[in-house]
Amino acid sequence: MSPLLFWSILVTAVPAAAQAGEPVAAVATSPEAQLAELVAVDKAFAEKARDLPFPDAVAAMLAPDAVLPARGAKPFLRSRDEILAYLKANPTAAEARAEWIPVRGGISADGRQGFTAGYLTITQPDGTKQPGKYMTYWGRTAEGWRALAYKRAPRPEGAVESLFRPLGLPDAAAWRGAAQQDALETLLAAERAFAAKAQVVGVGPAFAEYGRVDAINMGAGAGYTESAAAIAAGFDPEPVPGLSIDWGPDFGIVSAAGDLGVSFGRITPKQRPPGLAPDAPIPSSPFFTIWHRDTPTGPWRYIAE
C-alpha cells in the first residue's frame, strides 16, 4: 500500500535459463542463487529494452495476466494486451526508449516468485530524459521469469546508488513442507489490519508498525526511502488520526511457499479535494504492496511499496 504515491547480491554463476525469454527448467538451490537468477533476468530485459519502444519493452517481460496500476476509470489493468494498449496510447511513452537497473530485490522460499526494484530513465525521441523508479513482482512461468505486476513512478533528479542489495532472504528450511492454504487470506487480512490501525494511531505510526526494518518505499526523493522508521517519518503528523486517508485490498497474489505476496487495492482521501463537485465521488488511487513473513506463523510485514 503506498499512500506516499497518490498517482499511479550475491551473484554466483547464473544458469543459461536465466536469459530473458527462455524457460527455466529447474529452480536454483539456494535463495541467493535464485535471486541472482531473477536479477539477471531483469537486467537482460533491460538490455533488450534499449532497442524497443518503451511499451514493447515492458510488454516483453509481462505475464499474460500481469497487473498494472493505472490512471483513469479503471484502477488496474489485468492483462499484457491491455497494458500494452494503455502504454501505446500515452504519447510520452509510445516512441520513448527506456533503460533501467535493479538495486533491491527478494525471493520466495520456494524460488518461484520474487521482486525487483530499481531506477529507470525514459528518453523521448527529442532526447528529453525522464528519471523514474520501478517495482516488478515476478513469477516463474512456462516462458521463464515473467512480471506478474509492474509499476513505475517519476523521481526528481539526484544521485542514486546502483549497488544491488537483497531484502528479506528467506530461510528455506523453515518453509519446507509448511501447508499454506490460507496464505493469501492472511496477507489480505494484514493489509486490512494495517489500514484499520492507521485510522486509530495515524498513518505514520501504522507504517512504522507494519513495515520490516529493511522495507523500501518509492517515496518522493531521488532514491528509495529505506526502513519502516524512515518511511513512517515521511508522513506529516495528523492533528486527528483517521482523517487523512483510508485504503483496503481488492485482490492479491501469494507464493506457493506462503512467505511472499502482493496486495492490490485503492487509497481514498478522507477529505473532499478542493474543486470537486459536491455530488461527485471522491477519487481513489491504486496501490500495490509487496509483503513478506519470516516464518509460517510469523506476521506479514510490508517489504516494498
Image (cartoon, rainbow, N blue to C red):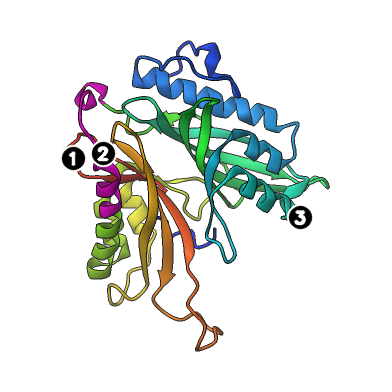
Asked which secondary structure carries label 3, the reply is helix
For label 3, the residue is 91
In the displayed structure, 160 sits above or below 155; it is above
Query: The disc labelled 3 sits on which kind of residue?
Result: Pro
Asked which secondary structure carries label 2, the reply is loop
Q: Is residue 113 left or right of 15 when viewed as pictured?
A: left
Residue occupying the point 50% across, 12% down: 15
Q: Is residue 46 left or right of 94 when viewed as pictured?
A: left
Query: The disc labelled 1 sits on which kind of residue?
Result: Gly
Q: Residue furthest bottom?
A: 278
Q: Residue 161 colored magenta?
A: no
- What is the x, y in percent for residue 37? 48, 20
* Depth order, front residue of 64/265: 64
Residues at circles 1 and 2 in contact by the CB criterion of under 8 Å? yes
For label 2, the residue is 293
Instruction: Find the magenta span and give its range.
Output: 171-190
Please say whether residue 3 is visible from this viewpoint.
no
- What is the x, y in percent for residue 93? 72, 49
Quadrant of the drawing holding the N terminus: bottom left
Q: Residues within 10 Å of mark 2 (few under 14, many from 20)?
A: many
User: Residue 173, located in which quarter of the rendered image?
Assistant: top left
> Real-space Cα distance between discs 3 and 1?
46 Å
For label 1, the residue is 298
